[in-house]
Image: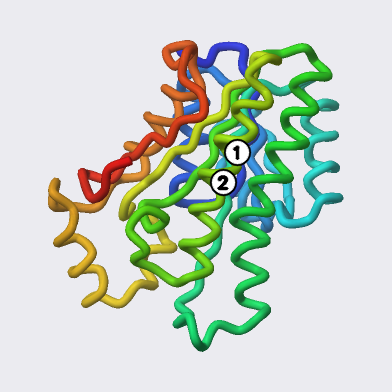
C-alpha cells in the first residue's frame, strides 16, 4: 500500500472527487481527516470506512475554522503528512453581470481556502518534523478560459500559489503540486447546461468525461513516494483537452 501509516487531510470530501480521493487513500493505507461544510452528511457518507476516517465540519474560507480543524487532526492522529485541497465552488455568472458577493465567494473558497489549508497544514507538518505533501486542485478551465471569470481566475491563481510555496517549502522537504482535472463526472458538473456540456466534450480528444477515481489515482501517485522528486508542477488529467 502506497500510503501506509500516512495521515491525510482532504477538503470537499462530501462528494465527487474529494470523496473518491478519501476512499482511494484509505485503500492505500492512509488515515484520513475528511472535511466538508456539512459534517453530519459527510460522516454518514463515509461511515463504511470506520476508524480510518475522521469526518469534520470545516469552512475552508475561514481561518479560524481551518486552524480548529488542524488542531483536531493533531489531537486525533498526532500529526499530518498530506493535504488535498479539493473544496471548490462555482457560479454561472457572466463577467459583466458578476455580483461582488459571488466574486468574493468563489475566490474566497477556491483560492483563499487553498491558501489557508496549505499554510496551516504545512505548519503542522513542520511542527511534527514530517516531510509532507500538499496537493492543490485546479481546473483545465484555468488554461482554456472556458468558464466564468471568477472560477477561471481562482483556479489559475491556485497554480501560481502552488509554484510559489513549492519553492519556499522545498528546503523543508514538503512537496507541493497542482492536480488539474478536465471535465469530470461530479455533482458540480451536473448543473452545466447540456448544450454547453456537449460543446465542452467535443474539445476532449479522448471523447468522454473523466471519472472521479481517475483523479483519485493520480492524487495517490502525487502523495506517495512514487512522486518523490516532483514538486511545483501542474499535473493535467484532462483527456488531452489542454496542455501545460
Left-right relation of 30 to 146? right
Q: Nearer the viewer, residue 17 or 52?
A: 17
Which of the image's four quarters has the C terminus?
top left
16 or 137: which is nearer to us? 137
Q: Which residue is mark 1?
A: 10
Query: Where is residue 38, by image quadrant?
Result: bottom right
Does 145 appear above or below 234? below
Residue at 38% over, 30% down = 218
Q: Residue at x 42, y 55 (%)?
A: 142
Q: Name the residue carrying label 2.
A: 13
* Residue 19 appearing in the image: yes
Residue shown at 68% from the left, 45% from the top: 115
Q: Nearer the viewer, residue 171 or 84?
A: 171
Local packing at callout 1 (Cα closer than 10 Å; few below 14, some 14-19, many 20+) is many
Q: Residue at x 79, y 41 (%)?
A: 69
What SS does tag 2 mark?
Answer: loop
- Residue 123 placed where, x, y %? 79, 28
**Colour setting:** rainbow
Dot 2 and dot 1 residues touching (CB under 8 Å) = yes
| Residue, far bottom | 97
Could you tell me how far apart the alpha carbons at marks 2 and 1 are, in whole angstroms? 6 Å
**Could you say where residue 16 lies in the image, as x and y percent from the top left?**
44, 50
Answer with left or right where residue 213 lies relative to residue 137: left
Which element is circle 1 on? Answer: strand
Q: The N terminus is located in which quarter?
A: top left
Q: Does residue 7 appear left or right of residue 89 in this picture? A: right
Identify the disc placed on residue 222.
none
Q: Residues within 10 Å of mark 2 (few under 14, many from 20)?
A: many
- Residue 6 position, x and y percent, is 62, 17
Q: Is residue 1 visible?
A: no
Residue 207: % across, % down: 13, 52
Amino acid at each position: 500500500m502506497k500510503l501506509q501509516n500516512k495521515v491525510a487531510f482532504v477538503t470537499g470530501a462530501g462528494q465527487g472527487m474529494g470523496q473518491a480521493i478519501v476512499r482511494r487513500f484509505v485503500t492505500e493505507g492512509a488515515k484520513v481527516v475528511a472535511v466538508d461544510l456539512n459534517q453530519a452528511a459527510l460522516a454518514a457518507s463515509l461511515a463504511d470506512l470506520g476508524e480510518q476516517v475522521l469526518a469534520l465540519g470545516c469552512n475552508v474560507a475561514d481561518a479560524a475554522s481551518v486552524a480548529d480543524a488542524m488542531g483536531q487532526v493533531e489531537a486525533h492522529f498526532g500529526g499530518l503528512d498530506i493535504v488535498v485541497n479539493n473544496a471548490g465552488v462555482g457560479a454561472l455568472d457572466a463577467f459583466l453581470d458578476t455580483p461582488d458577493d459571488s466574486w468574493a465567494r468563489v475566490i474566497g473558497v477556491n483560492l483563499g481556502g487553498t491558501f489557508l489549508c496549505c499554510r496551516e497544514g504545512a505548519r503542522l507538518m513542520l511542527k511534527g518534523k514530517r516531510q509532507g505533501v500538499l496537493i492543490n486542485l485546479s481546473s483545465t478551465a484555468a488554461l482554456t478560459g472556458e468558464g466564468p471569470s471568477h472560477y477561471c481566475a481562482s483556479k489559475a491563481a491556485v497554480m501560481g500559489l502552488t509554484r510559489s510555496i513549492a519553492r519556499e517549502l522545498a528546503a523543508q522537504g514538503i512537496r507541493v503540486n497542482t492536480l488539474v482535472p478536465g471535465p469530470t463526472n461530479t455533482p458540480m458538473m451536473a448543473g452545466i447546461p447540456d448544450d454547453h456540456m456537449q460543446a465542452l466534450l467535443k474539445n476532449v480528444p479522448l471523447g468522454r468525461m473523466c471519472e472521479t477515481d481517475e483523479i483519485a489515482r493520480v492524487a495517490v501517485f502525487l502523495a506517495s513516494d512514487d512522486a518523490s522528486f516532483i514538486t511545483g508542477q501542474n499535473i493535467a488529467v484532462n483527456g488531452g483537452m489542454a496542455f501545460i
